[in-house]
Each structure stands twice: as structure tokens, then as C-alpha cells.
Image (cartoon, helix red, strand yellow):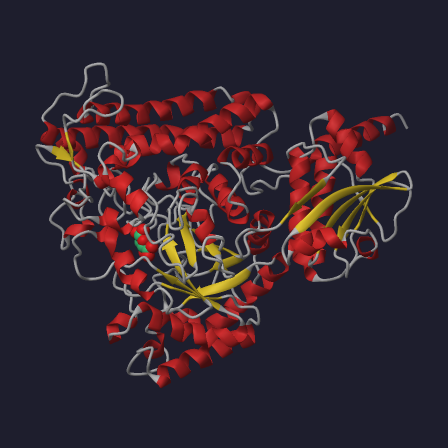
């Protein structure tokens, strides 16, 4: 008998600590940890307001929302939440659509729901008969799911939920991840293990990871995923693989996540046995139509195709003397009867060496404006070269009024330290989104072009090249999760600030404790600039190591084409450094609208962060700090290293506030990053010094090795190639 109270005590204790203790903090749960709310007052308030949950309806999406709310709330509140059909005595949380829930239908909120479209939602508190009703209401089931995630986020971040009145709808229609995943499960530029898609075990085995992946995406509103690499393999279009793709689509469907595939342009030859893939040939068109019909038969809500054509050796319409629009339109016609879209990439890098590679996409695509079908989006990378640590916005933005342009960001950190660097990329995304193209005068931001406002397009989209793999924590670096998260949040609402997004992510992923949130947010917000400083300050670009792109390689030259080398981009010589893209050089600035062209083209007015992107600048040139360009370069590189050391110090002081497993993981990665930062700084400064012939200022740390040492470093089997 005397054992009973003890048992009760033990059970009680378990109930309080269980949510934290039952899971290892290995990062698997991402920002969806749903640990018990630590703030006692908040916890009490939440428990009271969510006395019971009413979520009627039986669609798979409503079922997913119900499950998420039950799991989430029981974790956050530390108690099981009653699910009922009718309001009882407690205060109630009601989720649903007017069609799935009589309570929502009769709540008198029809007017507020109307403008929210088919993905938006409303979170609203009302008082009825002296009781509080909290509604998660939407026009569609997927809106209910999105609203449920938002509601959970409010609890996860300890917000007041007693007087809710907020609605939200996405600003961009297609919010898509691009996986550069190969069918053998390697991932091009992937640094978090292998591909999530276990093709061999598909279609029969549905890994729980697929569901958790879909949940994570839905929680930030990502509604599409391209499963395969842009360097495409036609095999995925065969019957066997279509069945596997259909199985994945089935797993994702309840979460509103559509699947897309990359289309290899030469597939009619490789799979269909045709002699040509010429888009104007009727038999080629017929092949794609039949193939699309077959795909849609298996996957009725298939999203469509993403295509990389005539770039880096990929086949395309130009092989047959046709242009990009003719290629895109053929595929667009094939998917149009099914409501599909084509995302045609503007990342073109052909086999002829241009005078300036930065100009190529604009030169090829601008003249095609107005010739694409209505269901084609042209997908443009954020900058004109290739996902460099920092790039000015791509001149195509704003410049194709008759064509919806889709943004392509890179989430995976190909040029930003890959899997081992902490670089929070929201500030980089925002820099592009907020840039003013001046296409229709001041305020014509890139964001307005891609959300359809600038040129009045209905069809809109944004893509992020995924950083996700089989690593237990999904993204290799724990902080890589923040980039997946922030891509999704910005895709939904590009007006959010990097700070707000970091704040949410840190609270949900780690803790709400202010003494952790603030400093960790600070290191995140400074991290991108830090990486730019130790890699490519002042507008330098494309000076990374050959092929695998890991580490510095400003000395890369004499390859089979100049525009694959570093010397082509930095053009360092005895006089100075930088790529002259003004009138006296390649005149790439002229591709921008006049106010931008004028600013970037003027040595005195160009933002310093883009200085060497647009100008070849004398080593003695005085920059804003009053230093010479050479000195400034030395200080920037050194600041980059110091920035990493600062991150290390901050993280070190967080030990008490973070679980041991993630603390050690991040700590170790930061020490790798510090080594990498020194490596970049020393290698680049020693190399550029051979031209500047000036000393590294004495107050700065001097390189530890010789230039030859750095030039000899040649890591093998770098992941992600
Ligand atoms: C570059 C990558 C390469 C990709 C290419 C692309 O190095 O692996 O195939 O972009 O976007 O950044 O197509």
C-alpha cells in the first residue's frame, strides 16, 4: 500500500517531464518539438483556453490537422486534449471549414473567410455564452492544416492566444523545394547525407520520414516539391518510376504538397526511341503528351515539370535550332489539359564562351518575353552568376513584363561553406527580394515581380534548392534547418523580417528563454555577412576551389574555358582587382533599368558590397572607411574570421541552456568553420598580395602558411558533387 503514493508521484512527474525526456535532442523533430510550455502562467492560460478540441470532417488533410493538433497540444500542454464532437463544458478550440464544421459555418465569419482564398486561414477568438471559442477556420482543408500549424507556433513561441484575430494567406502561389537528388540517391550539392527518396523500396515502403518531411513543409506553407535533379535522368519518366513517384505523391497529398519532376529534354529519344527531341516535331509533341497523360493517370494532381535546358551540357531546344520558349511551350501544352505548369530555368550556361557570363541569361530570355504559354514560369536564380555568397539581383527581374518570373534561391550552401558552416540565409534572400528593379519606377522590388503585383500576373512561384538529406537532423548542420524554415516562411510572406523568422525558429527549435534567444538570434543575423567577409568581400565572386567548390581557389586558371576559372572573375593585376561591368568593360550594368545601371555603374555610388562585382578598382583606391582597397580587403577578411570567433564565444556561453547533444554538435561545427575562415582569409590574401605587392597591415593576424601550402590543399571526395 505504501508504494502507491510514490507511484502516483512518479507518474505525475513523468507527465511533466515526459515530452522532453522521451526524445533525444538529435534535431530530428526540427522546429516541431512540441515540448511542454515552460512559462507557468502561459501554460495555465493555454490549458484553460484549450479545454477541448472539436475538429470534425474526415478528409486525409483534416485527419492530418487533427493528429497534429492532438500531438502538438498534448506535448505543449503536458496533458491529453479531449477531442469532442459538440462543445461540452470547457472552453473550446474549433478547427475546420464551413463545409466540414457546423460550428464554423454558423460562426458568422463568412466575410472574413472570403478573401483568404484556398490556402489562407483565420485564427479568431470569440465569446459565446460566457465561454471562449477559438477558431482555426479556412475555406479549404489545407487552409485548416496551415492554420493549425500557425496556432501551434503561437503556443510554441509563448504568444498570447486569448484574443486572436489574425488572418493569413500566401503571397506567392507555388512555393516549391527543388531537390537535386539523383536516382542513385546521391545529391548534387547536397551535404546532409543521401537522398530521402528510397527509390529501391518504393512504391511499397513508405518511410515515416516522408510524412515528417511533408509535415515540416506544410508547417511553413511549402506546397510543392521537385523530386529530382535538374541535371535530369529520363529514367524517372518510365512506368516503374512513375509508380514510385505516385507513392510519394500519395504520402504527401494530405499535407498539400504536390510533386513535380525534372524533364530531360532528350527523353523522347532515350525512352521513346525517336530520332529527335525537336519540340516542333509532331511526334515529339505527341510523345510528351502521351507521357504526361500517363503521369496524370497515376498522379492526378501532379504539379508539372522543371527543366534545365541547354545549360552545362543538358540537352534542350537549341540542339534543334529552337529557342527556350519553343521548348517550354511544347511541355506546357502537354501538361495544360491537366492543369500542370512548366518551370523553365533561366540558368543558361552554354558551350560558347561569352564576353561576360553574367549577361547570358538576360540576352537569351529577354527577347522571348511574351512568347511563353500561360502555364510557363521562367525560373531565375537570385543573381546572374550562380548562387555566390553575395550577388546583386538578377537583371531579368522586372525586365520581362509579359512573363511570370519565378525566384530560385539556393538553400543548400554550395558556395557558403557547405555542410559545416553556420550561415543564416534569410538576410541574403531578403536582400534580393527587397532590391528595387525600378522597372516601373521606384518601389518596383524583386518581390513584387515574383508575387505578381508588378506586372499583374496570376501565376506566381518561388523555389529553393533543398538542403535536406538522410542525416538524422535533416540538414547536416543544425542551423541549416533555419534556412529551410526561413525559405518557407518567406515564400509564404516575403514581408516578414529575417529577425522575426529567426526569433520563431530559435524559440521552437531550442527554447523561449530570453538569455538564449537574443544572443543566438544575433549570431544568426550576423552570420551571412561574416561568411561573405571571409570568402568574397566587397563584391568578389566565383573564387572557390575547382569543381567541388569547397574552400578557396582564387588561383584557378587555364581550364578548358575561361568562364569556369576564378581569374576570369576577379581579374586581379598589378593595378587593381574586380570585373569591370561598366561601359568601359562588359557593360553588363546596362541590363539593369537606368537608375540601377547608373548607380551600379558609378564607382562612387555603387554599394560597397558590390564594388568589385561591377568595377575594376585600383589597389590604392580610397573606400568609405578611408582605407585603401587593399587594406580594406585585408580588414574584411580578418573581420570574417573574427565574426566566426564571436559566434564560437556566444555559443560557448549557451552551454547551460541547450541540450548536450546539439550543443556539442554546433560547437564542433563552429570550430571547423573557424578553421575554414582562416583558410579562406590566408589563402585569398596571400594570393591577391602577389598582385597588390603590399603588406598585410601589422595589426592583423598574419597567415600561418605559405601560398604554396594553400594551393596544394586538395580535399578528395568532397560530398555533393
Ligand atoms: C551550379 C551547381 C551545379 C548545378 C547548377 C544548376 O554547381 O551543380 O547543376 O548550378 O543550377 O550552382 O543547374
Q: From this view, report whether residue 617 is shown above or below residue 191.
A: above
Q: From this view, report whether residue 282 is shown above or below residue 532.
A: below
The N terminus: image quadrant: top right
Q: Nearer the viewer, residue 477 or 330?
A: 330
Q: Nearer the viewer, residue 263 or 209?
A: 263
Name the image quarter holding residue 616. top left
Residue 312 at x, y percent in the picture: 26, 60
Residue 683 at x, y percent in the picture: 20, 32
**Quarter of image, ligand 1:** bottom left
Q: Seen in the image, is 122 located left or right of residue 219?
A: right
Extreme front residue here?
441
Q: Residue at x 30, y 30 (%)?
A: 533
Name the image quarter holding residue 371. bottom left
Q: Residue at x 70, y 26 (%)?
A: 39
Q: Nearer the viewer, residue 565 or 16?
A: 565
Is any part of residue 66 visible from this angle? no
Extreme top residue here?
699
Q: Nearer the viewer, residue 173 or 549?
A: 173
Q: Seen in the image, is 447 located left or right of residue 558?
A: right
Is any part of residue 405 visible from this angle? yes
Residue 569 at x, y percent in the picture: 19, 44
Give the tally of numbered discs.
Answer: 0
Q: Residue at x 61, y 50 (%)?
A: 169
Q: From this view, report whether residue 85 is shown above or below residue 643.
A: below
Residue 417 at x, y percent in the picture: 34, 38
Extreme bottom residue here?
283
Q: Residue at x 42, y 25 (%)?
A: 647
Q: From this view, report whether residue 98 is shown above or below residue 94.
A: below
Amino acid at each position: 500500500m505504501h508504494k502507491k503514493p510514490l507511484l502516483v508521484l512518479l507518474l505525475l512527474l513523468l507527465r511533466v517531464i515526459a515530452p522532453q525526456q522521451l526524445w533525444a535532442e538529435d534535431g530530428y523533430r526540427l522546429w516541431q518539438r512540441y515540448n511542454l510550455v515552460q512559462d507557468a502562467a502561459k501554460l495555465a492560460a493555454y490549458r484553460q483556453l484549450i479545454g477541448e478540441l472539436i475538429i470534425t470532417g474526415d478528409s486525409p488533410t483534416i485527419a492530418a490537422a487533427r493528429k497534429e493538433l492532438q500531438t502538438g497540444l498534448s506535448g505543449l500542454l503536458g496533458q491529453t486534449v479531449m477531442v469532442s464532437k459538440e462543445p461540452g463544458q470547457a472552453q473550446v478550440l474549433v478547427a475546420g471549414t464551413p463545409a466540414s464544421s457546423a460550428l464554423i459555418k454558423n460562426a458568422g465569419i463568412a466575410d472574413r473567410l472570403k478573401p483568404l482564398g484556398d490556402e489562407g486561414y483565420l485564427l479568431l477568438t470569440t465569446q459565446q455564452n460566457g465561454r471562449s471559442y477559438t477558431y482555426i477556420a479556412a475555406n479549404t482543408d489545407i487552409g485548416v492544416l496551415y492554420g493549425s500549424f500557425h496556432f501551434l507556433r503561437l503556443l510554441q513561441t509563448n504568444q498570447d492566444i486569448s484574443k486572436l484575430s489574425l488572418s493569413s494567406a500566401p503571397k506567392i502561389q507555388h512555393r516549391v523545394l527543388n531537390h537535386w537528388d539523383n536516382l542513385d540517391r546521391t545529391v548534387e550539392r547536397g551535404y546532409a547525407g543521401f537522398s530521402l527518396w528510397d527509390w529501391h523500396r518504393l512504391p511499397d515502403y513508405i518511410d515515416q520520414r516522408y510524412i515528417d518531411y511533408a509535415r515540416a513543409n506544410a508547417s511553413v506553407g511549402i506546397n510543392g516539391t521537385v523530386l529530382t535533379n535538374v541535371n535530369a535522368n529520363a529514367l524517372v519518366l518510365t512506368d516503374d518510376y512513375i509508380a514510385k513517384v505516385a507513392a510519394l505523391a500519395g504520402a504527401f497529398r494530405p499535407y498539400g504538397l504536390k510533386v513535380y519532376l525534372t524533364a530531360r529534354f532528350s527523353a523522347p529519344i532515350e525512352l521513346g526511341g525517336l530520332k529527335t527531341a525537336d519540340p516542333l516535331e509532331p511526334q515529339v509533341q505527341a510523345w510528351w503528351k502521351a507521357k504526361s497523360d500517363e503521369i496524370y493517370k497515376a498522379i492526378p494532381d501532379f504539379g508539372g515539370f522543371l527543366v534545365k535546358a541547354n545549360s552545362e551540357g543538358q540537352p534542350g531546344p537549341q540542339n534543334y535550332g529552337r529557342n527556350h520558349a519553343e521548348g517550354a511551350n511544347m511541355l506546357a501544352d502537354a501538361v495544360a489539359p491537366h492543369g500542370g505548369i512548366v518551370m523553365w530555368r533561366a540558368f543558361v550556361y552554354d558551350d560558347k564562351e561569352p564576353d561576360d557570363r553574367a549577361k547570358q541569361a538576360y540576352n537569351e530570355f529577354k527577347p522571348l518575353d511574351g512568347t511563353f504559354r500561360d502555364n510557363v514560369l521562367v525560373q531565375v536564380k537570385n543573381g546572374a552568376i550562380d548562387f555566390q555568397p553575395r550577388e546583386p539581383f538578377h537583371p531579368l527581374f522586372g525586365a520581362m513584363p509579359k512573363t511570370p518570373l519565378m525566384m530560385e534561391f539556393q538553400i543548400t550552401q554550395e558556395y557558403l561553406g557547405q555542410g559545416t558552416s553556420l550561415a543564416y540565409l534569410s538576410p541574403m534572400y531578403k536582400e534580393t527580394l527587397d532590391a528595387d528593379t525600378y522597372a516601373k519606377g521606384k518601389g518596383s522590388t524583386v518581390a513584387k515581380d515574383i508575387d505578381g503585383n508588378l506586372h499583374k500576373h496570376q501565376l506566381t512561384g518561388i523555389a529553393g534548392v533543398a538542403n535536406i538529406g538522410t542525416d538524422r537532423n535533416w540538414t547536416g548542420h543544425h542551423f541549416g534547418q533555419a534556412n529551410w524554415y526561413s525559405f518557407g516562411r518567406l515564400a509564404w510572406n516575403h514581408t516578414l523580417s529575417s529577425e522575426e523568422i529567426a526569433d520563431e525558429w530559435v524559440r521552437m527549435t531550442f527554447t523561449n528563454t530570453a538569455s538564449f534567444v537574443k544572443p543566438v538570434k544575433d549570431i544568426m543575423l550576423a552570420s551571412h555577412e561574416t561568411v561573405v567577409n571571409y570568402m568574397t568581400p566587397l563584391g568578389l565572386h566565383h573564387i572557390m576551389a575547382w569543381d567541388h567548390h569547397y574552400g578557396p581557389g582564387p588561383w584557378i586558371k587555364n581550364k578548358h574555358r575561361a568562364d569556369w576559372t576564378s581569374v576570369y572573375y576577379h581579374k586581379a593585376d598589378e593595378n587593381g582587382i574586380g570585373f569591370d561591368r561598366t561601359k568601359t568593360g562588359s557593360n553588363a550594368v546596362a541590363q539593369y533599368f537606368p537608375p540601377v545601371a547608373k548607380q551600379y555603374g558609378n564607382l562612387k555610388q555603387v554599394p560597397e558590397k558590390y564594388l568589385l562585382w561591377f568595377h575594376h578598382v585600383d589597389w590604392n583606391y580610397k573606400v568609405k572607411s578611408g582605407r585603401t582597397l587593399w587594406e580594406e580587403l585585408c580588414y574584411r577578411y580578418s573581420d570574417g574570421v573574427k565574426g566566426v570567433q564571436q559566434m564560437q564565444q556566444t555559443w560557448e556561453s549557451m552551454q547551460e541552456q541547450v541540450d548536450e547533444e546539439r550543443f556539442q554538435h554546433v560547437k564542433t561545427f563552429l570550430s571547423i568553420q573557424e578553421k575554414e575562415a582562416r583558410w579562406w582569409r590566408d589563402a585569398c590574401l596571400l594570393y591577391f598580395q602577389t598582385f597588390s605587392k603590399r603588406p598585410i597591415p601589422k595589426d592583423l593576424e598574419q597567415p600561418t602558411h605559405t601560398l604554396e601550402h594553400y594551393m596544394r590543399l586538395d580535399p578528395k571526395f568532397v560530398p555533393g558533387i
